[in-house]
Image (tube, grey):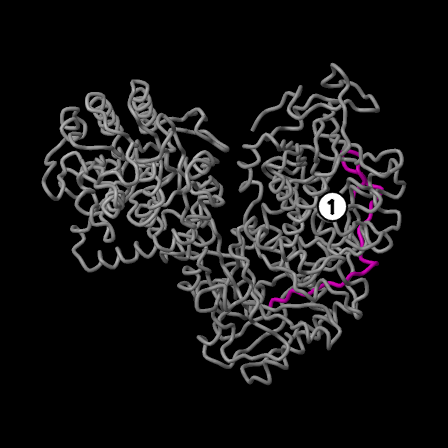
Amino acid sequence: MIGDARSVVRGTTIEADICIVGAGAAGITVALELLGSGMRIVLLEAGGTTEDPEDQALYEGEVADPLLHSPPDKYRQRRFGGSTTIWGGRCVPLDVVDFEHRPWIPDSGWPVSHQEVAAFYPRANAVCEAGDCVYDAESAVPGGMRSVLRDFSPVDFTTARIERFSCPTDFGRRYRDRLVATPDVRVLLHANCTRLLASADGARIEQAAVETLDGNRFNVVATRFILATGALEAARLLLASRDVHAAGIGNARGLVGRYYMCHIAGTIGTLRIDRPAEHVWQGYDRAEDGVYCRRRIALTEAAQRREAIGNAVFRLHHPRIPDPGHRTGALSAIFLARRFISYEYGKRLVTQQPVDARAWLQHVANAGSDIFGTSRFLWHWLCDRVLAERKFPTVIIRPRKNLFSLDFNAEQVPNWDSHVRLTEQTDRFGMPRLHIDWRYSELDVRTVGTAFRLLQRDLGQSALGELTLDPDEADIETVIRRDGAYGGHHIGTARMAHEPATGVVDEDCCVFGVRNLYVAGSAVFPTSGQANPTLTIVALAIRLAHHIKADASRPAVILRRSPGLGVTHSNAHVPQPVLMGEAVSEHSA
Amino acid sequence: MPAIGDAMQTVLVIGGGEITGARLMGALAAHPDYTGIILGRTISRDNGSLRNHDATKTADIATALAGVDMVVNCIAGNPRTILATTKALCDAARRNPPRRIVHLSSMTVYGGAEGLVDEQTRPEPPLNTYARARIECEDLVRKYVADGGDAVIVRPSCVFGPGSEPWASRIARLLSARRLGDLGSLGDGVCNLIHVDDLVGLMVAMLSASGVSGETFNASADWPRPTWNEFLIRFARAIGATPVERISARRMQAEVKLLAPLLRGAALAAGRVGAGRLVPDAMTPSFVRLLRQNITVSGAKLATRMDITHTPLDRAIDETAEWWRSRQTAAANEPATQVSRGATASCPHSAAMFRSVSRPTPDNEVGR
């Protein structure tokens, strides 16, 4: 059942077994996994079914260094489906080493093992529509996937690990029908959870305060609350709920919002391959189930240990688009069309220095002189990306001269100083806005730099080509600063730990000291690994749902209704619960 | 009722042209207690004993019932034929009652019902012409029982396996043409299947089962039900229709609303000149609706009453895929016009008989 919070009778208190705040990848997955459990679920979504500037404006906030981190209202979508409405679909599991305590990485180590999370990856793969849970290049495609670079046998890297791609699945659109069809779940759109109200002793959450942009207010009382709003908004809501917990819920040790991580990612260097073009494959293979798969050049665990650095992967990439020196028509066409590309996907096309007229003309000349290549690319993009339901994942363009750049995706290590906090500014609901102070560390720079150097060495020793930094890449840190925090990967603001001294949530994602409040999403990741977070978010959401089902089999607190009263139309301090679906007038979607 | 050790019993199979009937004939031929004869609309048995009998005519059925101990009614085709045949059978059987009629119905009688459905579940809209005909047939059979006859009703889910036209051949053709595949939310419905050989085994068992007269049984495999998406992807991989295509809702709408009417018209026109089989399959609204229907056909009642072993899904898919591939190979070696869609290399009865019954029409193609 899907309803609209604006139509709920003002002052109503809705009762449920589970209240999920946020209908993105995590929230929808938890709801789906709890279907049929007999629990009544209220799923609160702050936005509607489409992007709305008014809703989106509620995400606005401050960024300490706009060159390093995108504005908080970018890469996030406040609507049904959350940021899965714009994600790229890359699915990669975390590696075993990501879960370990690594002495050279302060605050590393998960309180759960890789095995415990990996058990949920197959199901997560299915939910993400990323096909079989097979991340090995030899097994993913019958006969094995094509080699990235023939005869390349690196010492410190492996090309056997792959990434798989979701459609990319918009969870809202994909799973809407299932949620509509079941009476167990009640989705409320336009329902902004503005505070979590704790019991007097602070040991449990009693209700979620919900407001709508048109001024409606009501509460949700539930046995359990699950915060599934993404790492930024989860920290914001915890910190802003200060009725009982003066520093914010779960923040007695000042850890909420700390250890904020993204990935260190971008495009780096020039790789010249001294082999025939057919010896190089930068593109995708398709698995039998139709899923696009791609090899990655992954730093081995042994190299990470030996060099005392974080995790990292590289991918062959076309030359950097803004530089017309690539002489590739299709790339220049993309550059010329960048104004029509969304902020999230066009960010790397924006140069910090203005593009001069000469470069413009060169791009125009590239597109014109390579008209067949440009047309072929546009046709492929129209058929395989724009019109396709399972979309071709990224721009793959064969460079003219066997000159590539490298896409890199590196772990950002936990860093206390990298944080988000509340500001004095508030949104329309009076909720404090976020200040994002994302910081990378020396170790992050060393991870990328060392990985780059090791790859240079492996390529050099194999005599297949040469990898160099570009002239404008004075050093690795310059490269990192140029691309900044990887957009959309918001991680670690409510980290998981064995004990409250080192984390916000326990192994079951339950907030320390608040026995009925859980956090679902990448906020709980203690480390970021090299992998894009969505698959692990979904796996952890499934794991959380399993935990809740098991936990719910124990005796639970029973909330009582006042005799004869279905709804309270008052500002009474103690709410009178209403059973789900009763006494409210709302549009059934 | 016949029992083990009785003399050979003769079983009249109505609708033996369909794969289920054809396989049943094979099973009866191999059975020590039964001998089967088939009755199609204009089809004859090899020994010529039942030439040109029309199963929709009471007089013809009455003739066919002479010397017959039991009847299995697995008539398929268009709703009118199904209804007329069942009515003729019941009428004829009243005059010359066989020991038992096993009436093959369909899960389509549940219409749009969702959730776990058992034999007591009432039909829910939408009910198309085919579903209404099936319900009416069941009513006729129940009335026959009320009048003193002995009959049992079996409601199979989608009959899958080598030779199955609607749920193996048609699906394989659509997958190969990339018109079916991973359907996203449109394929989230529960896939209720039963292997044709399991169904045949059940029908044979029903011939001699005691205490089942007047009863209705769902027949559906008891393994965890896949979604249609899961089934389609597995089947597509097994037949080599890879990479599996992701089909958008927009495309499915175009299939149903634009292409299906055109194909149905083309099939009718082509049928007049004997080229109906050359027209691609139409995906009708009822078929597409089924793929997203969250219906789980409960086989619990049957499981408590009969000892039925179901073919595992993987094995069913593998052997069906193998059959399909061999059929494709055979087709490649023959002129296209000689290959009947319903004909099966592994099923000697069906090759001749498929043409004897009406080809499933768009309305009845759910044919469950």
Q: Residue at x 79, y 19 (%)?
A: A570
Mark 1, Cα crowd under 10 Å, few <14 / some 14-19 / many 20+, is: many
> Is residue A424 found inside the magenta-colored segment of the image?
yes
Which range is magenta? A407-433
User: Is residue B144 shown above or below A16?
Assistant: above
Question: What percent of the width, then of the height, locates residue B17?
Answer: 21, 40
Question: What percent of the width, then of the height, locates residue B173?
Answer: 31, 49
What is the secondary structure assignment of the residue under circle 1?
strand
Count of numbered badges drawn on the protein: 1
Q: Residue at x 49, y 71 (%)?
A: A281
Task: Check disc 1 and report the residue beneath it.
Answer: A519
Q: Is residue B161 shown to the viewer in this render?
A: yes
Amino acid at pointer 1? Val
Q: Is residue B266 shown to the viewer in this render?
A: no
Q: The residue marked by circle 1 belongs to what chain?
A: A
Image quadrant in which the C terminus of chain A is located: top right
Q: Residue at x 49, y 59 (%)?
A: A292
Front-most of residues B245 and A563? A563
Most extreme residue toward the front, as rendered? B5
Question: What percent of the width, then of the height, locates residue A261?
Answer: 74, 57
Question: What percent of the width, then of the height, locates residue A572?
Answer: 82, 21
Picture quadrant of residue A277: bottom left
User: Is residue B329 shown above or below B117?
Assistant: below
Front-most of residues A22 and A388? A22
Picture quadrant of residue A440: bottom right
Front-most of residues B324 and B253? B324
User: Is residue A279 shown above or below B93?
Assistant: below
> Is residue B240 found inside the magenta-colored segment of the image?
no
Q: In this view, does A426 lie to the left or right of A71?
A: right
